[in-house]
Amino acid sequence: MTTATASPPVPLESDPGSKKKRLKLGHDPNLAINGGAGTTWMPFPPPWARVAQAVALSGDVLGMIPRIAKGKTTIGDGSKVIAKFEKAFKELTGSEYALAMNSGTATLHSAFFAVGVGPGDEVLAPAYTWHASATPALQCNATPVFCDIDPKTLTIDPDDIERRINQRTKAICVVHVWGNPAEMDRICQIARRHKLAVVEDCSHAHGAVYKGKAVGTWGDVGCFSLNNKKAVDAGEGGIAVTDDGRLFDRMLVLGHFGRIQRGQALNTFDFGDMSLGLKYRPHQCAMQLAVASLKRLAKLNRRSQRAWDILCEELRDVPGIRAPETLPGATRGGFQAFVLAYEGETMGGPPRDAFVNAVKKEGIPLTADRYSELNYTYGMLHKAPLFRVDRRTISGACSDITRDGSAVQADVLPNAERLSRQLVSLPRLDTATDGYVRACGRGIRKVLNGVLGS
Ligand SMILES: Cc1ncc(COP(=O)(O)O)c(C=O)c1O
């Protein structure tokens, strides 16, 4: 979208003798940060999840109260709500099996376990994601290896996947970050060629589709968080989908004491009712919220897509800002946040934080993107201390006795590193009016004009 045209802005505050009003950023006195009027005073519309829950509380969830009053609160008490949610999710994705759990992290651990990730193995994952896409590999005594991302989509770069495959590689974790489907056909081809498992982290992408197939059904297992900011919201929860009954049984036996005997797909295990030391069963109240929330997913996705399209239209060909692309044949879903790349610094504009601050002053809820600078210190995941610790010093499942030393990944990931200084984020504008979304675009344009314009 952008080519450099402007000369670097002169910070006017460096002119102490001048009677002119001192400007805090760029040349433009009309920017709110320089004392001008803001772009909008419209209040930020409440995110959909909270609206959805308020509605859910008035109907589906109240229906649980009689059961709670009778003390019937776990799957062991014969509740049907978990089965109801799993059935609805199978219908959403078209998958053969679905297993609800108490977090998205639990689904990822279960998926890595199910596909056979074990001691000494490596799991490829994108550097740009929430840490839980990779940390459960540690619980399988394996090592996450981070790949660079495609700057166009912000999802894992298939070329970098190929570069990092070696004899230890066991699985690829693909993340459809911010609901934007990754290039699944190509990634699955690579995985087949190298006999690797594919786990899809769809935590941002409920209802997203790639080339006619729901995300989560391209790889061996698809994992969805149902945590409270997600498009399908159980408060806390997760659900894994697969077409492979053997993988379903392995996930079940890892953490679902109480439903193994009658719940297996292929009766792979004869363990009575005992699971392998974890308890990943979801709470029924959470599942009731999830049922209610799932009914509203199609509407949330329509509203989010409309808001995203308007925002992209407002920012099309605006120098200094770029919206990630959706691949041909892909439909975004879940959305989670509206992330953009601020490229103004490379054109002589201010650093990202100063830009974000100026946009905020316009009344627009823009922030620095939280995954691009974890804890606002480390950059993306390959820089995080958690993945650089000497794992011989950690006891339990995470320790790594197969390697002499830490899992330090010293490589430079050029796209991840550049984007970790550029990405900015708006909330998923799922309840916003068209006017509010346009105001967000206008505010961003106004600041870019003010800091890059002639
Ligand atoms: C991309 C991604 N993966 C995994 C998770 C983990 O999900 P949960 O918080 O439900 O354990 C999250 C949660 O924010 C996420 O955003």
Image: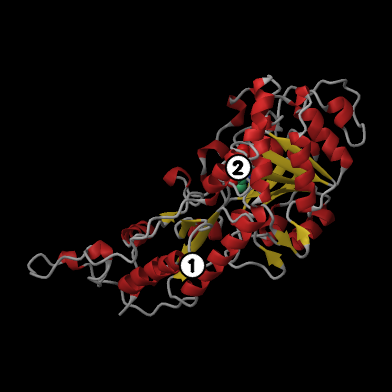
- The label number, if any, that marks residue 56 in the structure image: 2
- Residue 383 vs 70, above or below: the answer is below
Please name the residue shown 82% across and 49% down the image. 95
Colour style of the rendered protein structure: secondary structure
Q: Secondary structure at mark 2?
A: helix
- Of the 4 image quadrants, the one containing the C terminus is bottom left
Place residue 59 in its image quadrant. top right
Badge 2: residue crowd in 10 Å (few <14, some 14–19, many ≥20): many
Whether residues under marks 2 and 1 lie with C-beta atoms below 8 angstroms apart, the answer is: no
In the image shown, does 159 or 309 lie closer to the viewer? 309
Assign ligand 1 to one image quadrant. Answer: top right
Give the number of callouts.
2
- What's the amino acid at mark 2? Ala
Place residue 189 in its image quadrant. bottom right
Measured as percent of width and height from the top left, residue 78 is found at 79, 26
Measured as percent of width and height from the top left, residue 204 is found at 62, 51
Q: Secondary structure at mark 1?
A: helix
- What's the amino acid at mark 1? Asp
The alpha-carbon separation of the residues under discs 2 and 1 comes to: 25 Å
Judge whether residue 83 can be spotted in this image: yes
The residue wearing badge 1 is: 434
Left or right of residue 181, residue 364 in this image = left
Mark closer to the chain start, 2 or 1: 2
Please name the residue shown 77% across and 52% down the image. 93
